[in-house]
Amino acid sequence: MIVPLNFSRFRQAFFNRDGKAAPPATRLLPLVNRAAHRWLKDGSSLIHLNKATLLNIARRRTGLQDFGDPAFLEPLGILLECLTNEANLHFIGRISVFHDLVRQLCNRLHLVADRQRHPEIGQQTVRAPLFITGLPRSGTTFLHALLAQDPRHRSPRVWEVMYPSPPPGNSDGDRRIARTARDLEWLPVLMPEFETVHLIAATLPQECIAITSHAFLSYVFESMYHVPSYRAWHDGQDKRPAYQFHRWFLQHLQWQNPGERWVLKAPSHLLALEALFTVYPDANIILTHRDPLKVLPSCASFTEVLRRGFSHEVSKTGLGREISQRWEAGARLAVATTQGQAAPPKRFFHVAYPELVREPLAVVRRLYEHFGLELTPAAQAALHHFCRENPKDKKGVHRYSLEEFGWRPEEERERFRFYTEHFDLKAET
């Protein structure tokens, strides 16, 4: 996901001296939003979400002019129109969106300048990456973080995606780590339930939608904001440019800090496997599976947590319809992978969520064997330590139900029967 904002000058109003969110913080923001809605029209006259303004601010902040391939301008324009007309942003949400879009544009400028100074970045080869995908809330984040513990693996870390320039080295003392950690402190202020629904930290792996967001061709935007027109437009686009930018970004990250292979993750890869294999013809795919009646409400609840951090209202029933339609399509694509429609079956390894939770290291051992990888003693020790330090529900229990999003369990069970029977998935209690 994209981290929202960094109001450094206002930190004292929201945080204690130890950096934790002050108790009144989550009550203060709604008051600010209500006042801004009444008196400032949500800040629409102060904070301009238009393309020319954002581009000019990014140029002034960086002193740079070249954004690279201008193809990003069309999706940026469509996204901004939808954010303005559909997302129902409140005041803090508008500030947050503005800040983050400017950050991404500044990153583009710096990335292009870095490559002009160091053309050898473009000679980097991304070999046989591992992509983790599957229905959302099926263990992809945990598995990504777990596999990233292998010292030979390379994953894009949150701080590297937030602030990728200059190209990161292998130092754990990079100042951008602390900067990103300060940014992440805002998450429980803006989204009080966030820590119970998603694992994130400055040095943990980041998912690929935060990379492709810099091309403004990304599924991240439909997760964070209600932008149905952008979603419909994006669904109809060729996804190869997004993956070409993704590879371009990885070249930048690995130039001074390579690994034996990249380990990457996003549920939305499932929706674009053909484009993924076009850009990464030697990629291998780890596909996670879970009972859809657990996936759907967990995904809807997480999306609600995200969107409430930016918007006045979130329709639960509308969200239910949206999530069900999106991931029924995803489930059908998951079935298609076993029928050789994207790549040969040997390029895929399937993981059942209950087994991943119960025996993560056993799953990893079979995964390594399937893809012909060596699980070294150092990797085993690192993976074991991570599992011990990150038990399930470490930050609290994520509670949700089908009914609150307008679903009837028997109807959804029937809707996804093709998927559960194909992968022999049992109902979770």
Image (tube, rainbow, N blue to C red):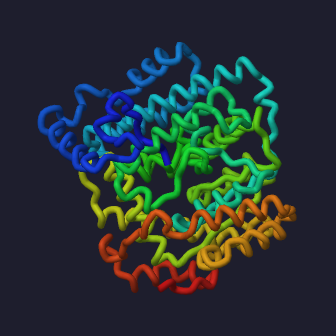
Q: What number of labels is visible? A: 0
Q: For the point 87% across and 64% down, which residue is it? A: 372
As rendered, which of 130 and 343 lies closer to the eye? 130
As rendered, which of 169 and 310 lies closer to the eye? 169
In percent of width and height, residue 5 lies at: 40, 37
* Residue 227 is at least partly visible in this image: no
Q: For the point 71% across and 35% down, which residue is it? A: 171
Which residue is the extreme one toward the left? 38
Residue 220 falls left or right of residue 108: left
Q: For the point 64% across and 80% down, which residue is it? A: 423
In percent of width and height, residue 342 lies at: 71, 62
Residue 33 falls left or right of residue 106: left
Residue 133 vertical placement versus 262 (above, below): below
Q: Which of the 4 image quarters holds residue 4? A: top left
Residue 190 falls left or right of residue 238: left
Q: For the point 43% across and 44% down, which residue is it? A: 185
In percent of width and height, residue 282 lies at: 81, 53
* Residue 1 is at least partly visible in this image: yes
In percent of width and height, residue 410 lies at: 40, 86
Which residue is the extreme one toward the front? 17
